[in-house]
Structures are given as structure tokens and as C-alpha cells.
Image (cartoon, helix red, strand yellow):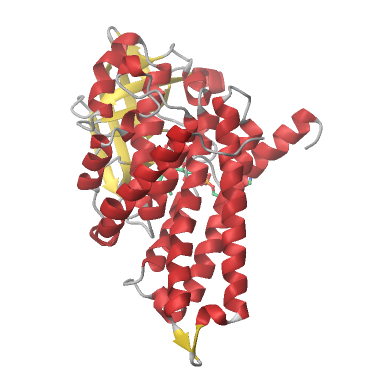
Amino acid sequence: MDFQLNEDQKIFKATLHKFVDEVIIPRAPDVDQDGIFPTENFKAMADLGLFGISIPQEHGGSGEGIMSCVLAMEELGRGCASTANTFGSHAILCTENICRNGNEAQKKKYLPGLIEGRKIGAIAITEPEAGSDALSMKTRAVRKGDRYILNGTKMFITNGPVCDVVLVYAKTNPDAGPKGISAFIVERGFKGFSSGKTLKKMGVKGSPTGELVFEDCEVPAENLVGEENGGIRVLMNGLDRERIVYSICPIGVAQGAFDVAFRYAQERIQFGLPIISFQMIQEMLAEMATEIHAARLMAYWAATTADQGGRVRLEASYAKLFCSQVGMRTVDKAVQILGGYGFISEFPVERMYRDMKGIEFGAGTTQIQKLIIAQELVRKGGA
Ligand SMILES: Cc1cc2nc3c(=O)[nH]c(=O)nc-3n(C[C@H](O)[C@H](O)[C@H](O)COP(=O)(O)OP(=O)(O)OC[C@H]3O[C@@H](n4cnc5c(N)ncnc54)[C@H](O)[C@@H]3O)c2cc1C
């Protein structure tokens, strides 16, 4: 097992660290308070080439592996969870998915705009009555001549209120269960496609979440991704990779919260001493740092294994589960260390505490990760 980053990865992480310190962190309070899409951050990420990191060079990206996506997500999460969430939906769930599963014509048409940040991407799976049980979706797609007609409503869609391009899953054969789902690329401007309600949220407020509505929405047949009724393959192909990238986001936020709490503990004087000299504060900081370290290694290990081409279903869910739990525990301790000031919006841990809950749901809830882990353990006959 080798957890060391190679030289290129170290340089990439250092570049991103500086970018996040100088560009993302100063804007994070406004992104949260304004609760609107972070356009400037989106443009800055595009200028840095972040939207093409996992896209092969022949399609306009830089062809890096999943480890680089993990490093990007971690650093962005450290600075601003809303921006990290925007990155994940746009670059990983939409752009990378189209690259992995789309045909040459679709890649040629959609990838340049998405990689250059001229278009905003999203993915639409969840529905009001189909969350964890995503395959029970009701959105219907019926072929009529050279197009499909989509009807239904998608729920909780990150970038939904602002997206230009969205990868939508719908039933083409409702009686065939998982084998009756298909994936489509839908563009803003297609007849019958609109954004519904924008949802007011507890956290990740700068990452707009909303409903998408399809009312006799006309989608050209050439926008079918993969085969008709082959949507489950599109959905599953790369799901473990996506899960690994999303697993590290809470650890980025946790690192940001630790940094704030550590500095604060050195500066805050009570009983004539910096509070960091009190052993109960030291205990919290020690636990935070240890858990962050362990969770980070778990995500890096999963990413490294994925980059080597191994099966990572178990590793991805281990990482997603543990990183989410560590993230929640860490922000809780960070607020505690800041005392009453941790509860005040002027201090960033208040935002991080709220954001952490929001990023726990992406790529499957904690309970769903436990189910996957148990299923994999049964399949393998043990741990
Ligand atoms: C901020 C945010 C952004 C999102 N972005 C997107 C997006 O871009 N695209 C998209 O398609 N979706 C998105 N989602 C939806 C997200 O994937 C779902 O919220 C998630 O899948 C859970 O579905 P649900 O909220 O309907 O909860 P439910 O599935 O109704 O679950 C409710 C509770 O029951 C638990 N539960 C469910 N099934 C089981 C079971 N079998 N065993 C034990 N416990 C169970 C869950 O863990 C949860 O605690 C987003 C959600 C949020 C909050």
C-alpha cells in the first residue's frame, strides 16, 4: 500500500490549495449568504481547467485519474462546500458521465462547452417519490418518430435552477424494472423542459437545488445516451468512482473547520490562558485530526485502487460512510471549540456545520452505504 502522492499530484494539490486560499475562501461567506449560484467561482474553476481533469486529452481534458478529482474536491470542500458541490455535479456527475457513456457525436457536441464552463451541467435521477429507491422513478419517455417525449418531475437537482445541459433518467419500459430505464441529454430550451421550484435549504446555499419539470418535453432521439432501456448501465458505470469523489468532500470541509478551530484555540484566552492549553480542548483537536487523517487515507486508498482499475464497490462505500461520519463529528467539535462564537454566522464554522449535513446525502445516504457494505461483505463471504 502506497499512500504517497506522486510529484504531479503534489504540485496539483499545492496549486489548488493556493487557489482555494486566495479565491474561494474569501468569497465563501457571500456565496452562502447570497444563496445564489457562484458564477465567479465557476468561471475561475473553468479557467483553471478543473472541469476537464478526468476527461481524456483527445476530448479536450487533461486525462487525469480519479485521484486528481479527489484532490480537487477535497480542496474545494475545504474552502466552500457550495462550490465543491457545484463542481461535483457539473464536472463529475454530468460532464464525465457524458464522456464515459456518450457516443462520439454527443461528446463532440456537449463536452467543449461543459469543459470550458460556457455551459452548466447537472444530473437528474431523484424524484419526489423516488429517492434512495431511485429505480422506482416515474418519469416516462416515449419514442415518437425521431424524438422521445418526456413527462415527469425531478427533485433535489443540484444546479437544476441554472443548468444548460442535464443528464436525465426516465422509464422507457415501465414494466421492465431496472431494465426499462434510459438516459437522455436534455438542453435548456428544449420544448417542454423547465425548472420548477428552487428549494430553500439549511446549507450549501450557494449550490442551487431545484425541481426540473418535463411536460411533453421533446428530446431528439440522437440524445439518447447508450441504448434504449440501457440506462442502468449508464447509471452504474462509474457510480463507484463518483462515490469516491463525493466521499472526500466532507473531509475537505472538516479540514477547513479544524483549521479555524485550531487557530481560534490558540488565540482565545480564558482563565488567563489560551484555551488550547486546556486538555479537554486538546482532546477534541487530537480526535478531529486523527479522524480526518484516517478518513482521508480511506478515500485516497479507494481512489488509488480505482485508478489501478480494481473493483471498488466496497472501498467506495467504506470511504463515503466513514468520511461523512467523521465530517459530522468534526464540525460539531469545531463549533464546540469556538463556544458561542461558533454559533454566530460571522464565524465560518457555523456555515460548515450547516453545509456538512447537505453534502452527506449526495451519492447515497449513510444508510444506503451501510446496505451496500453489508451486501458486498455477504458477496465476499466476510471483510
Ligand atoms: C443538497 C442535495 C443535493 C442533491 N443533488 C442531487 C442531484 O444533483 N441529482 C439527483 O438526482 N439527486 C440529488 N439529490 C437527491 C439525493 O440523492 C437524495 O436526497 C437521496 O438519494 C435520498 O433520497 P430522499 O431524500 O428521497 O430520502 P429517502 O430515500 O426517502 O430516505 C429517507 C431516509 O430513509 C433512509 N432509507 C431509505 N431507504 C432505506 C433502506 N432501504 N434502509 C434503511 N434506510 C433507508 C435514508 O437513508 C434516509 O435517512 C440531492 C439531495 C440533496 C439534499
- Counting from the top left corner in percent of width and height, residue 94 is at 36, 29
Residue 122 occupies quadrant: top left
- Counting from the top left corner in percent of width and height, residue 34 is at 23, 59
> Is residue 266 visible in this depiction of the protein?
yes
- Counting from the top left corner in percent of width and height, residue 360 is at 50, 50
Residue 297 occupies quadrant: top right
Q: Residue at x 49, y 57 (%)?
A: 254
Which is nearer the eye, 190 or 20?
20
Q: Quadrant of the C terminus?
A: top right
Vertically, is 88 above or below 26? above
State how many labels appear: 0
Vertically, is 23 above or below 134? below
Q: Residue furthest top?
A: 145
100 relative to 325 in the view: left or right: left
Q: Residue furthest front?
A: 7
Which is nearer the eye, 263 or 44?
263
Vertically, is 160 above or below 111? below
Q: Residue furthest right?
A: 381
Vertically, is 17 above or below 303? below
Q: Quadrant of the N terminus?
A: top right
Q: Residue at x 33, y 14 (%)?
A: 58
> Is residue 368 visible in this depiction of the protein?
no
Q: Residue furthest bottom?
A: 271
Q: Residue at x 22, y 25 (%)?
A: 113
- Counting from the top left corner in percent of width and height, residue 288 is at 57, 63
